[in-house]
Amino acid sequence: MADYLSQDQRPISPQCSDLDPDFGLEYFAEPAFRIEDSSQLNPLCAGMENEVADFLAHAVSAVPHNLLRHTQRIFFHYHRHDQDGLYAALQDLFIALGCRGYTLRKRLLAGARDRLKQDCFARLERWLGSDFLPDWGELPPTRQSVLAPGVIGSTSLVRVSVGAQDHDRDPLLEAGEHIEYSQLDQARAVLEEAVSRQPGRTDLHQELLMLYRATGDLDNFLRTRETLLQIMDVMPEMWDDCELYLRKAHTS
């Protein structure tokens, strides 16, 4: 994910590895701010593992060619002994690189072998030795991939989404491209439209709220929330958390 704030505007906070596990993490900025400039390959934050996993997945989705984020995500799931997350992270790296980066893909796959399911490793190894993209229906299913095109995973099958079209662009990817070039208003507009059209997508809510938080945009937050209240029976709790954050920021 590209910079939302300049270096001078960012809150000063310790790196993940420097945090005392017993200290209240709510006093610090979100993982997005602590990981953004970190070159650590294993950005663990005690007590915030789920938030870190979400941030890295969203960062990869927004900017697929960011190899540092891919590598951090792979290391993160490897050290958590998360087989499904590790497989998804490797699969997304393979998708992003295509036929490029053979040495990097080979090294990371070899290093992760002992924590991958045998069939997952075998399919990725076969993919590594091929110059073509795989048949998506033949890959082991995973719900944690953020780059697999139009594929829905389950415990029993993988099927191509009926509504998936090659020309349709994921709004997360489009917004990420705007963010990469500091076009924050355009990114916000893309996400606001997308979340109103697809209110059931939690990842869109998370990305939009992260942008509101990073820019301190209470006015647009309130406007969008009113719009969503007209089409959703229940708003996700993350909206309440974001409102508290923004109002506190405006009064401080």
Image (tube, rainbow, N blue to C red):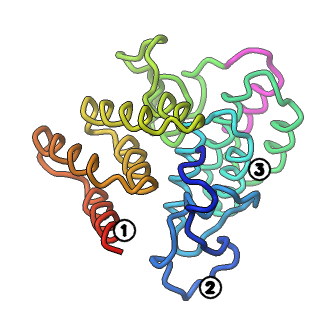
Q: Quadrant of the C terminus?
A: bottom left
Per the model, the C-alpha gap separating discs 1 and 3 is: 42 Å
Q: Residue 45, position in %: x, y? A: 60, 70
Give the residue displayed 55% in from the left and 37% down from the top. Answer: 62
Image disc number at residue 168: none
Q: Which residue is mark 3?
A: 112
Q: Earlier in the sequence, mark 1 or mark 3?
A: 3
Per the model, the C-alpha gap separating discs 2 and 3 is: 29 Å
Judge from the rendering whether residue 102 lies leftward or rightward of residue 46; answer left or right. right
Q: What residue span does the magenta drawing correspond to?
A: 119-133
Q: Earlier in the sequence, mark 1 or mark 2?
A: 2
Q: Which residue is mark 2?
A: 20
Give the residue displayed 31% in from the left and 36% down from the top. Answer: 192
Please tell me whether mark 1 or mark 3 is closer to you in this view.
1
Task: Judge whether residue 123 is colored magenta.
Answer: yes
Magenta stretch, overall SS: helix
Three-letter amino acid code at disc 3?
Ala
Three-letter amino acid code at disc 1?
Ala
Give the residue displayed 74% in from the left and 46% down from the top. Answer: 68
Give the residue displayed 35% in from the left and 16% down from the top. Answer: 163
Three-letter amino acid code at disc 2?
Asp
As helix, strand or loop, the secondary structure at mark 3 comes to: helix
